[in-house]
Amino acid sequence: MSPPHAAFEQGPIRPPSEAQSLLVRVSRNCPWNHCAFCPVYKGRRFSLRSADEVLADLDAMREVYGDRPRTVFLQDANPLLSRTDDLVRVVAGIRERFPRVTRITAYARSHTLARRPLAELQRIRAAGLDRLHLGLESGCDAVLTLVRKGVTRAQQLEGGRRAKAAGFELSEYVMPGLGGRALSAAHADDTAAALVAIQPDFVRLRTTAVHPGTPLAALQARGEFVPLTEVEGAREIRRFLAGLAGVTTRLESDHVLNLLMELRGDLPADQGRLLAVCDRFLALPDHDRVRFMLARRLGWIERLGQLDEPGVRAAVDRVVRTLQERGIDPEEALAELRAGTL
């Protein structure tokens, strides 16, 4: 929910699953802000807002929205750095002002959770913070180092486990392609193994895109990072999914950057069906695969079967002819489409 005027603060981003949530800014920007892949918060200082500031915002929000909000998301990148007493006051304040709210969620960093006493996390959970969104990104130390994530695999495991032990629902984000071509296999295998160890409630896919001006773009320019093609990315995701035997979780492909939006289901029950989606894509003839990828990246379709819907194939054929006439490699066009989509 965005404000109709500047009566209260709200930050720049939230997870796709929180699109309808009331956004409550508890912290400003990101305390780490060095991740090579991230274009957000660059050049901005991190700060924590006082509980009194946030409670005043909640009063203003109540005036604007009444009791309509059903879900609330705490911004920005790491509100769990707040003092326990302050965060408890904020969460309790939300529950008091918006009694019809059924879920309060927040971003957090594994590094923070791994260092936070379990008793403090349990207090915050008891106050009414229900779910944490963690950017695992990768369970591979080599990948985490490459992209300057500022956390180790061991800290990722400890942070995730501690969140679960405190009673939070846990949503872990994974970035297919983050290791590039050189680390693709290790990224897939180690990330799957980390999730089996953590046992999160949700695993959410967000495909890596190299955004202009980011440190990851500089790594690519120096030849230190070679992005995966769409087909290589699908192969990596298949390998990752095959490694998830033993995890009980909900897999979501709910971000516009993802190619295969059909990769949604409950594990372990749906593992075979999800692997079959990858296999269907990889088995497509080259010309159909190119057409599907272009149609998907242009936002025309979401599922493999939609390529044969009336008008879709003809429209994407026109795009292919235009690229051919201009001498543009479809893979280059696809990479540009990914990079330009936040």
Image (cartoon, rainbow, N blue to C red):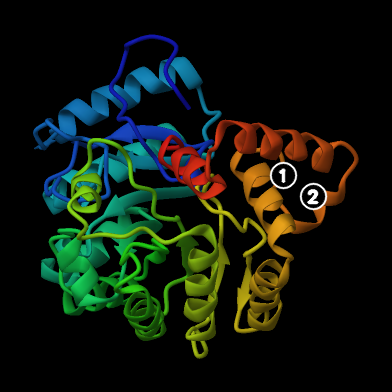
Q: Could one spot residue 25 in this view of the protein?
A: yes
- Residue visible at 34% across and 49% down in the picture: 106
Residue 37: percent from the left, percent from the top?
27, 50
Q: Name the residue under label 1.
A: 301
Horizontally, residue 160 falls left or right of residue 52, namely right
| Res 243 label | none
Q: Which of marks 1 and 2 is nearer the N terminus?
A: 1
**Residue to which mark 2 is pinned:** 307
The kind of secondary structure element at disc 1 is loop
Q: Residue furthest top?
A: 5
Foreground residue, 210 or 71? 210
Classify residue 136 as left or right of residue 206: left
**Residue closer to the observer: 145 or 198:** 145
Q: Label 2 sits on what residue type? A: Leu
Q: Residue at x 49, y 67 (%)?
A: 232
Q: Is there a contact, CB below 8 Å, between mark 1 and mark 2?
A: yes
Which percent across, then down, holds residue 271?
Answer: 63, 81
Crowding at mark 2 (Cα within 10 Å: few <14, some 14-19, many 20+): many
Residue 225 in picture, x, y percent from top left? 25, 59
Q: Quarter-wise, where is residue 278 in the image?
A: bottom right
Q: In this view, does 168 lie above or below 33?
A: below
Residue drawn 25% across the image and 45% down it = 217
Residue 95 can be seen, yes or no = no
Q: In this view, does 222 lie above or below 120?
A: above
